[in-house]
Image (spheres, rainbow, N blue to C red):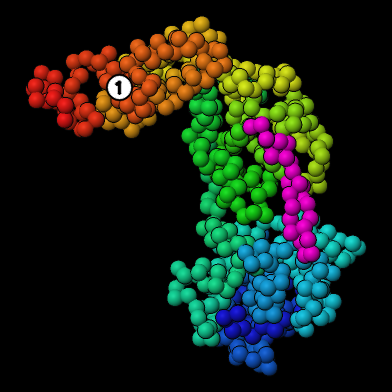
């Protein structure tokens, strides 16, 4: 510990946190004297460990408290007076700060190298073994007091056998106290300014100084978690109010309200995922990024990623919706989607702990929000839902989707609950590519529980999109769409090519760049898809050959040459007056009527 203190705690003396905080709250800064504090039987053992005075007593435990020193206010006393929730944790940190033996035990034994508390050590037997080489903790009472103090501070809920702590039932949030702890450390540094071996130059450097002390270990946080927590949670944000449902989302919103589960089906490129994303944008009132479940989890310390803390953040941020997305695939399973057993290291080996996966976690957060009276909507997007093995992924949860609000027993118990309840507030949106013939027909049990909305391949998005460079650019996209649609005229509606392939990216700044982008996407994305349709018997190879020929593409040439040939063909069809005025491959721009005989000679 780089800051000197008077502190030598009695490790075998039990400290009753709530009583100590009540007595600290009664101290009057500038009036109560050190002698008064010392005369208090409850505070006497801690009189010079957790209370500051002006002037500061001499640096010796032999010095007695006198009436000359008066209590000096600090963050701990302020929290005690106001009965702030961080009071018990601040008292714990003040004790750790005051005694280098306790601080060393916390940093070297109770936490790992990253700063997190080691769950397997937090019981009487394991901690006795871990601290066996430290004579100050030889007494059983010292071991018991460390565990009891952590429990009283609100670090964890213990498992007990009688009165003995034999394990951790649940870790509790500690990150919220970091801003107050930084103020307490700054108080202590200023108090001991003439006795520090090093100290922050100003309050702006307190965070770095706290990390140098290892203060993140006191709360069981990593450095990154401590740094994020130091910024504070911020002021609560008023709840977001949704706007009226846009016309393009009306059908989806209506079906979600009626059934809560919808699958958007259609051929590739029809904008199924775009439609799901548009719904999320509306549901979150444009706050899509901060409303994502993963974004909230990333901002929380690892051990605070619980349904209760997620609900806390949803309310604090004033979110109208909480959402996330997963993509199904053939190897995706129940353990990836619902719940799983995860290996966790413990002294002498590993243990397996049941944990939430995305469906269980978002459902539990929804149940918590509903219990608080929140009307926050939960949205879970299942991308390419038909690529997964539905019975293997959902298991017993297919029943829960249909019978909302009813607990369904699961194979794994998380936080003491062996059931999952799907709340009424959870909307599930699946997307399904109808052109993927490598996948079997969608599971009947899933189909019965979902409404299926077909998203057709039409030219409407091309007509209404405002991102085209000009109308020549739009006309080229419409011609490409029509040419492919006509070539596939005899195929099923689910075997088409959607308009998304012909939408502009917004990067092109002129017509030539726009046509090149359009040609590139056709050659590198649409043609391979049409080739797959030929192999599957959905498109005649002769029809594909005619389509390619009509577009001026020679399939025997390299793809880059095909792109340039198609760019020229599109320009000739949509803007013939401009042919020859746009840059060619070498970057020259010459009008046809200015070309000379010399220009046409091979170079």
Left or right for 357, reference 560: right
Judge whether 546 appears above or below 228 on screen.
above
Quarter of the image with the N terminus is bottom right
Q: Is residue 254 visible?
A: no
Residue, far top: 490
Whole-percent x and y of residue 596? 8, 22
Quadrant in which residue 218 is drawn: bottom right
Residue drawn 52% across and 30% down?
277
Region rendered in magenta = 329-355
Whole-percent x and y of residue 396? 79, 31
Quarter of the image with the C terminus is top left
Left or right for 401, reference 249: right
Judge whether 98 appears above or below 304 on screen.
below
Residue drawn 64% across and 85% down?
6
Q: Which residue is mark 1?
A: 565
Judge whether 109 appears above or below 252 on screen.
below
123 and 66: which one is in front? 123
Whole-percent x and y of residue 407? 80, 34
Q: Is residue 140 visible?
A: yes
362 and 263: which one is in front? 263
């Amino acid at each position: 510990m780089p800051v000197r203190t008077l502190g030598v705690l009695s490790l075998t003396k039990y400290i009753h946190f709530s009583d100590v905080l009540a007595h600290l709250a009664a101290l009057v800064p500038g009036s109560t004297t050190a002698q008064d504090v010392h005369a208090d039987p409850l505070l006497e053992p801690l009189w010079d460990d957790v209370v500051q005075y002006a002037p500061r007593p001499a640096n010796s435990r032999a010095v007695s408290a006198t009436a000359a020193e008066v209590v000096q206010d600090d963050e701990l006393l302020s929290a005690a007076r106001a009965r702030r929730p961080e009071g018990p944790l601040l008292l714990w940190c003040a004790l750790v700060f005051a005694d280098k033996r306790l601080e060393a035990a916390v940093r070297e034994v109770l936490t790992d190298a990253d700063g997190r508390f080691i769950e397997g050590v937090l019981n009487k037997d394991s901690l006795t073994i871990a601290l066996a080489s430290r004579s100050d903790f030889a007494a059983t009472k010292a071991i018991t007091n460390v565990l009891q103090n952590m429990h009283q501070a609100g670090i964890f809920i213990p498992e007990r056998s009688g009165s003995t702590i034999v394990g951790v039932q649940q870790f509790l949030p500690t990150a919220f106290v970091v801003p107050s702890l930084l103020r307490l450390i700054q108080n202590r540094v200023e108090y001991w300014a003439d006795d520090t071996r090093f100290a922050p130059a100003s309050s702006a450097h307190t965070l770095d100084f706290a990390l140098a002390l290892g203060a993140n270990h006191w709360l069981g946080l990593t450095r990154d978690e401590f740094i994020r927590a130091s910024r504070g949670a911020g002021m609560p944000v008023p709840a977001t109010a949704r706007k009226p449902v846009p016309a393009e989302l009306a059908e989806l919103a209506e079906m979600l309200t009626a059934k809560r589960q919808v699958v958007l089906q259609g051929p590739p490129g029809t904008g199924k995922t775009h439609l799901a994303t548009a719904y999320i944008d509306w549901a979150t009132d444009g706050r899509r990024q901060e409303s994502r479940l993963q974004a909230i989890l990333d901002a929380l310390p690892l051990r605070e990623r619980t349904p209760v803390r997620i609900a806390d953040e949803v309310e604090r941020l004033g979110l109208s919706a909480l959402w996330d997305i997963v993509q199904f695939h053939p190897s995706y399973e129940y353990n990836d989607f619902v719940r799983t057993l995860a290996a966790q290291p413990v002294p002498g080996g590993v243990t397996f702990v049941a944990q939430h996966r995305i469906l269980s976690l978002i459902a539990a957060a929804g149940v918590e929000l509903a219990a608080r009276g929140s009307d926050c909507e939960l949205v879970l997007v299942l991308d390419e839902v038909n690529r997964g093995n539905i019975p293997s992924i959902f298991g017993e949860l297919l029943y829960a989707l249909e019978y909302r609000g009813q607990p369904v027993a699961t194979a794994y118990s998380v936080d003491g609950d062996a059931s999952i309840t799907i709340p009424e507030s959870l909307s599930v949106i699946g997307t399904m590519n109808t052109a993927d013939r490598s996948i079997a027909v969608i599971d009947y049990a899933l189909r019965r529980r979902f409404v299926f909305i077909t998203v057709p391949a039409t030219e409407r998005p091309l007509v209404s999109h405002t991102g085209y460079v000009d109308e020549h650019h739009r006309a080229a996209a419409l011609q490409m769409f029509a040419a492919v649609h006509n070539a596939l005229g005899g195929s099923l509606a689910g075997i088409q090519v959607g308009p998304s392939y012909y939408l502009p990216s917004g990067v092109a700044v002129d017509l030539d760049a726009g046509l090149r982008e359009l040609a590139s996407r056709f050659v590198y994305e649409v043609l391979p898809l049409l080739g797959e349709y030929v192999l599957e018997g959905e498109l005649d190879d002769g029809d594909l050959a005619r389509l390619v020929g009509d577009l001026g593409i020679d399939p025997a040439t390299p793809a880059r040459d095909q792109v340039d040939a198609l760019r020229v063909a599109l320009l000739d069809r949509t803007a013939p007056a401009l042919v020859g005025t746009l840059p060619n491959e070498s970057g020259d721009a010459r009008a046809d009527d200015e070309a000379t005989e010399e220009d046409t000679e091979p170079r």
